[in-house]
Image: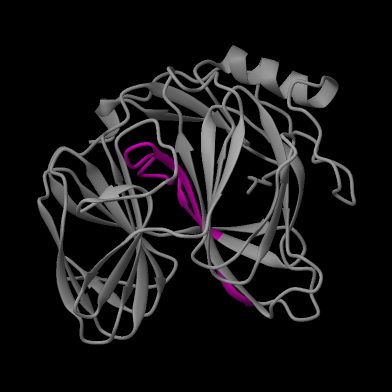
Amino acid sequence: MSNLDRQAVPSLCGGRGFVVAEPVRELLSPRRVPLGESTEVRRLLPNLGRRMVGAWAFVDHYGPDDIAGEPGMQVPPHPHMGLQTVSWLHEGEVLHRDSTGSLALVRPRELGLMTSGRAISHSEESPVPHPRFLHGAQLWVALPDSARHTEPRFEHHTDLPAVTAPGLTATVILGALDGAVSPGVVHTPLTGADLTLTRGAEARLPLDPDFEYAVLAMSGETHVDSVPVLPGSMLYLGCGRTELPLRAESDAAVMLLGGEPFDEEIVMWWNLIGRTHEEIAEAREAWMTGTRFGEVKGYAGDRLPAPELPATPLKPRGRVR
């Protein structure tokens, strides 16, 4: 999925100076951003007070939207570099096309994982015809320097492992959780899981104390470490936890995101992740004038032009806490 913000501003992310080294309960409020003609997303990362969670660098939650008679998601071809995109649906379908020639229809609880490596372009759209409702999350994972210049690729996994407990099913989307490992390729120690809880369920999920974590609420009401978390909000949990207490006040679903704190400092702008302002500027120019990002074939429409990049390079911001 794209960041369609025409006033995109570079963000300085990563580095352990931004990490909270102890358990916290920091509730993040979303910023509402239009996506295409009939979809609005709630952006949780990057946030004014929180830039990353492990290698997770971008989190959008959208829906449930009634798109009957509407075009639904319509994201024209656009570029990515230095990251992985994670498409995750609870309702609806999204048709993915990219410049490697991949074409896939991603359905609920299936993993669409695109690794941009050095450069890729893709489009996403609701198919015609499409289901009435659209509800899901779009997330980015920052690639470490050792993997960010690799060849681009796309993975579509329809069978994912799960961890179960009374009233709880945790589908492992990416990385590992309680011994279950996703087939999706990762490049840093990571956890991404979709947790479905029945009303009244109480559970304690094992966590890695070296990871930082956050919980994104998808539906229903869940108390996470005694904090009510409602749909479209995210609770940042910091590091140092060995378990996560959960209690469902209704049938509910949340996403658990975590990972080893991302050591490298990155510059994120529009749909690109690099290490310097100059690298981002070069990639923007390549998208506008060159062939580096390839061609998305089969999309009925023009590709997305890049917004203007501010001329002033970012400087380190120092510690968040």
Q: Residue furthest front?
A: 159
Q: Is residue 10 visible?
A: no
Q: Report x, y in % for residue 121.
A: 71, 35
Q: Is residue 189 above or below residue 233?
A: above
Name the quarter where the C terminus is drawn. Answer: top left
Residue 146 coordinates in the image, percent (x, y)? 43, 17
Q: Is residue 151 left or right of residue 163?
A: right
Residue 252 is drawn in which quadrant?
bottom left
Residue at image coords 30%, 53%? 214
Q: Nearer the viewer, residue 165 or 121?
A: 165
Give the image quarter of residue 55.
Answer: top left
Residue 53 falls within the magenta-colored stretch:
yes
Examine the structure image and report whether residue 139 is included in the region drawn in magenta.
no
Quadrant of the image occupied by residue 78: top right
Q: Residue furthest top?
A: 278
Please report the bounds of the magenta region as a residue range.
42-65
- Residue drawn 21% across and 86% down? 200
